[in-house]
Amino acid sequence: MKRRIRLITSCALAMALAVSGPVSIPNVNAANVTVQANNVSASQTPVGQHGALSVKKTSGYAAPTIVDKNGKPVQLHGISTHGVQWFPQYISKDSFRSLRDDWGIDTVRLAVYARENGYTQGNKDLMDKKIDEAVSAAKDLGMYVIIDWHVLSYNPNEDIDAAKTFFTKYAVKYKNVDNVIFEIANEPTGTNWYDGSGKDLYTYSKTIAGIIRGTGAKNIIICGTNDWSQRVDQVADKPLKNDGFENIMYTVHFYAATHYDNIKDNVRKAVKAGTPVICTEFGVCDASGNGGYDFSNADDWMKLFKENNISFALWSLCNKNESASVISSSCNKTSNWTESDLTEAGKWLVKTCKELSGKSGSVNPTPTPTPTPTPKPTPKPTVKPTPKPTPTPAPTSKPTPTPTPEAGTTTGGSVTFDIPSDWGTGFSANNTVSNNTNKTLNGWIVEFDSDVEITAIWNAKISSHKGKHYVLTNESYNGTVEAGQTVSFGFNGTKKDGSKATFTNVKLR
């Protein structure tokens, strides 16, 4: 949610600009999915064919890229889990086998949240168990695994001691394992790649890379970049290769219905400057993780990646009730999925990975599900660097929507609050400001009273919070709302367990 303009109270989760409007036409021509009982020999698995990966300059590509044991360029086709603490059931050998044999996936990224009730906040034992299970399953199946220290919208130097402990442990454990890759910061934000402060991303990355290399581990290391890992272009002025590090890459994240040529240009600049780029997270929906799809733009991103041998992993492997998920919210299966079990994002991923791996049309079709109603095409949004969808904390099963709380209205405008996810002590709110006048709204302010504590906010700012009273204002990029149009903002919050998140005395001005 991993891509999104997010604000950002201290522990910000985030999601991005989502000015409402029509959405792109779903990709109803997705590749068919057939459950296969494959007995794949070890030599024919991805790891069996390619072995330990490294990052090297090779003929035909402007920047160093991933190559296999024979020095041949390899593009990884992957998927990212949602937060391991919320959806651990998809981390299993059966799930991974289905991804490999039925979807054409060769890599699974494990989203190990550092915070958000993750590794440093109560779920260390679960996450350690699932990392071991994932690496073991992937090793048996000949697949690659990215262990992602899922920093989300904060400076990773704040938790650097925990990161040192984590990567020391796993570098020692997996330094001789061919299929393991380390991602040391998912989406750091508000932190320059290099500014000489000693608290920048360069310093963090150099420190953690040094920890990993100090164990003797030569595994590929992936570094996060500023602005929700969208500023991969900034690395060129101070790359870790200048400090003698090898097998280092830098990640870019995008969401196809939000991120267009401005973020693609960041990638082009990085590649031209010789920066090794990988995409460890992207979506075919908008940066909130919801909304409409833009498959045409997603295909254009794939074209860019293929031209530059940039590997990728789509967000996310779960059945959470949001557009970014690949499993339908009505499906509780954790393996052996058929086409009817998949969302439009899932169908697109299968089609794309099969085409890239040369397996398109190689399986028999399953019964075609009833097509999803076709939304109206969405106009290309203003190219604003808005980061990815931040995954909202969710239970390990399909979130149960709660009733929409009280909406506030005022003369000439309205505000609607909607709670799609409620997990007892916390919730996520997707909110809408509507301009019901015949004039353009130039800037907006939302006031309300509530007992909740907002812990993360996106597409708006908290300008005041006194007692129960909140005052929120627009961001610089979404203050203009044309007559008859709407703009969305959202936040996560905590509340008394068992209570309902309610908002009263709501005013829009």
Image (spheres, rainbow, N blue to C red):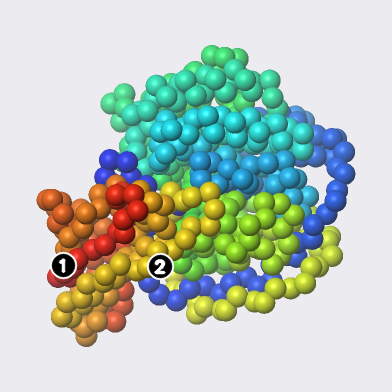
Q: Nearer the viewer, residue 444 or 116?
A: 116
* Element carrying mark 2: loop
Closer to the N terminus: mark 2 or mark 1? Answer: 2
- Is 151 drawn above or below residue 18 in the view shown? above
Residue 321: x %, y % from top left: 51, 61
Residue that mark 1 sits on: 505
Q: Residue drawn at (38%, 51%), measured in percent from left and top?
A: 424
Mark 2 neighbour class, 10 Å CA radius: few under 14, some 14 to 19, many 20 or more: some
Tell whether 431 sits left or right of 54.
left
Q: How many marks?
A: 2
Query: Can you tell which mark lies on residue 30?
Result: none
Image marks 2 and 1: residues in contact by CB distance under 8 Å:
no
Residue at disc 1, secondary structure: strand
> Which residue is located at x 78 percent, y 50 percent?
101
* Quadrant of image for the C terminus: bottom left
- Do we see residue 148 in this rendering? yes
**Which residue type carries mark 2?**
Pro
Q: Amino acid at mark 1?
A: Asn
* Residue identifier under label 2: 381
